[in-house]
Image (tube, helix red, strand yellow):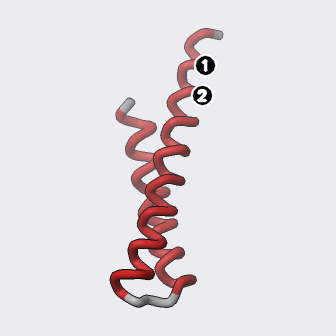
Amino acid sequence: MARKKSKDKKMESGICVGLGVFCFLGFLGTFIFQADLGQSLLVSFILSLAIGIVFSRKT
């Protein structure tokens, strides 16, 4: 039971990091590259998913 709880905790932190990175990259991409908001949000969403998965696996 305790082991499952720690895994859920790691998953939550990975998701939080992924969401933070997603928001940051989305707005950064829009301002720097003057890209279409939808396009830059899509790219940052994919990147943040990858980062979130990697982060949750490492911890």
Label 2: which residue? Answer: 8
Residue furthest to the right: 1
On residue 32, which mark appears?
Answer: none
Does residue 37 sit above or below 15 in this rendering?
Answer: below
Rendered view: 6 above or below 8? above
- Residue 2 picture location, percent across and down: 60, 10
What amino acid is labelled 1 in the image?
A: Lys
The residue tagged with tag 1: helix, strand or loop? helix
Q: Dot 1, crowdedness within 10 Å: few (<14), some or many (≥20)?
A: few
Left or right: 7 with respect to 28? right
Q: Nearer the viewer, residue 7 or 24?
A: 24
Q: Position of residue 25 (x, y in %)?
A: 42, 67
Compared to residue 41, the image places residue 17 above or below, namely: above
Image quadrant occupied by the C terminus: top left
Percent x, y for residue 39? 51, 84
Q: Quadrant of the N terminus?
A: top right
Q: Amino acid at mark 2?
A: Asp
Q: Nearer the viewer, residue 4 or 24?
A: 24
State how far apart marks 2 and 1 are (Cα).
6 Å
The residue furthest front is: 31
Q: Tell me if mark 2 has few (under 14), some (14-19) or many (20+) residues whose alpha carbon lies within 10 angstroms of its own.
A: few
Residue 15 lies, in percent from the top left, at: 54, 45
Helix, strand, or loop for circle 2? helix
Q: Residue at x 47, y 71 (%)?
A: 26
Would you say the residues marked 2 and 1 are in contact, meaning their CB atoms lie under 8 Å apart? yes
Q: Residue at x 43, y 89 (%)?
A: 35
Q: Residue at x 57, y 36 (%)?
A: 12
* Snapshot quadrant of residue 7: top right
Q: Look at mark 1 in the image and give the residue it sits on.
A: 4
Name the residue: 60% across, 28% down.
8
Comparing labels 2 and 1, the label whose residue is closer to the camera: 2
The reply, left or right, for residue 16 in relation to residue 47 is right
